Amino acid sequence: MEFIKQPMEIETRSMEIIAPYLSQLKLDEKAVKVYSRIIHAAGDVEYAPIIRIGEGAIEKAIEALRGGSDIYTDVEMVRTGINKRKLASFGGEVHCLIADAEVAKQAKAEGITRSMAAMRRFGKKLDGSIVAIGNAPTALFEVLRLVREEGVRPACIVGIPVGFVGAADSKKELAENGIVPYITVAGTKGGSPIAAAAINAMMYLINNDRG
């Protein structure tokens, strides 16, 4: 059986297959790149009509990345999926505290999830940064609380938690927050690979060298 073996050729062909599903959405070139990588990561063209990108979100995220912004994540799977070498070339790092012992103690003491405690621990470090949430709706709810109540101002929130409890509601709140630019997916779909894909797409818009 003949099949494509070269990674970039596989990606190019994938994007060609995805393109018709985006043609009716009236997206600009940058949005097409982000949508395409999200759909590619999911292997699911049904993502096309449910991706939501707030006004100026891609531009704000790219500006932050170019300036060496760090990325703060809810789980290790998101951190693992982000191209850290590419991010480092801009001067940024990825942070995740889900396995931190002090965060675990705080979560137990306060009766909250570890991902919520991690976001509280990050606190003002989130200012000017990019937040990438791919698993825990509670983490997204907490970041939005920090934005609303404590004046924390990330450059962009990529909030794409997955699941049937809280995920759709947290993403709806993100899309309606009116303060911080965002990238999300409506409904229950999402996950760590999807959040990481959105981040990588924006880094590749700056520099498409995959080294």
Image: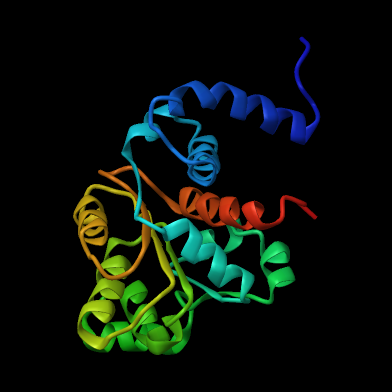
Q: Is residue 208 above or below residue 66?
A: above
Q: How many marks?
A: 0
Question: Could you tell me which quadrant the N terminus lies in?
Answer: top right
Which residue is drawn at the image coordinates 45% and 25% (left, top)? 23
Q: Residue at x 27, y 81 (%)?
A: 146
Residue appearing at x 54%, y 35% in the figure: 40
Figure quadrant of the C terminus? bottom right
Q: Nearer the viewer, residue 71 or 189?
A: 71
Asked if one can make out residue 113 in the rendered structure from this viewpoint, the answer is no
**Is residue 157 placed above or below 127 in the rendered structure?**
above
Q: How is the image coloured?
A: rainbow
Residue 8 at x, y = what percent? 76, 35
Tell me residue 201's x, y (percent): 58, 50
Most extreme residue toward the top is 1
- Can see residue 9? yes
In the picture, measured across the screen, residue 185 lies left or right of residue 94, that is left
Q: Position of residue 21 (x, y in %)?
A: 44, 24
Q: Is residue 140 above or below residue 9?
A: below
> Measured from the top left, where is residue 77 in percent x and y?
52, 59
Residue name at image x 38 percent, y 82 percent = 104
Q: From the viewer's perspective, is residue 171 above or below residue 152?
A: above
Would you identify the image quadrant in which residue 113 lies? bottom left
